[in-house]
Image: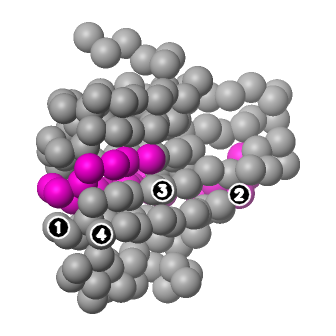
Amino acid sequence: LFRSGGASVEKLLSSCPVLEDLQISRREQDNVRNFVIAVPSLKRLTLDFSTPEMDLYDGDDYEDGVEYKLIITAPNLEYLSLIDYMSDSIQVNSMARVTESHLSVCKILECDNRTVEQTSNYESNVREIFRSIPNVKHLTIGDFTTNVSLD
């Protein structure tokens, strides 16, 4: 569905002006560099941008110099579930209505020596997400997400 690029994602979602519940699973890198979700009517958002075959992932498949961005603008969002191990940069606008959230965020590249690296944007991404959901009452945090200083 998203093989033709980020513009198709934006176009598809903009044609759904009363959309309230959105679930997207993205299991591999694709040609969508800027994954933009801008849906004012959205109340529930579930994003699973994980790579289940991490042990098979070869860092050579990752394009050098290409940055994958996730941009979320959903001012009426009440529920956010975000598993994102692909995005280099995550930009979110204030989601003050979110009362429940499940977060597991980290940019993971598995290297030849089988170690896990986190990009320098990781802490910034996590901080921005937490700042965007100031009224959250129920929060579940994944393992990688807890490795950040929120100072």
Q: Residues within 10 Å of mark 4 (few under 14, many from 20)?
A: some
Mark 1–mark 4 distance (CA, rounded to whole Å): 9 Å
Describe residue 70's horizontal placement relative to residue 146 as left or right. Answer: left
Amino acid carrying mark 2 in the image: Asp
- Label 2 to label 3: alpha-carbon separation: 23 Å
Q: Residue at x 74, y 35 (%)?
A: 111
Q: CA distance from mark 1 to mark 2?
A: 35 Å
Q: Between disc 4 and disc 3, whose residue precedes?
A: 4
What amino acid type is highlighted by mark number 1? Pro
Do labels 2 and 3 touch, CB within 8 Å?
A: no
Which is more foreground, mark 4 or mark 3?
Answer: 4
Q: Is residue 15 magenta?
A: no
- Judge by depth and name the residue closer to the eye, 26 or 20: 20
Q: Which residue is mark 3?
A: 47
**Badge 2 or badge 3: first in the primary sequence:** 3
Query: Where, quadrant-wise, is the C terminus in this rendering?
Result: top left
Q: CA distance from mark 2 to mark 4?
A: 35 Å
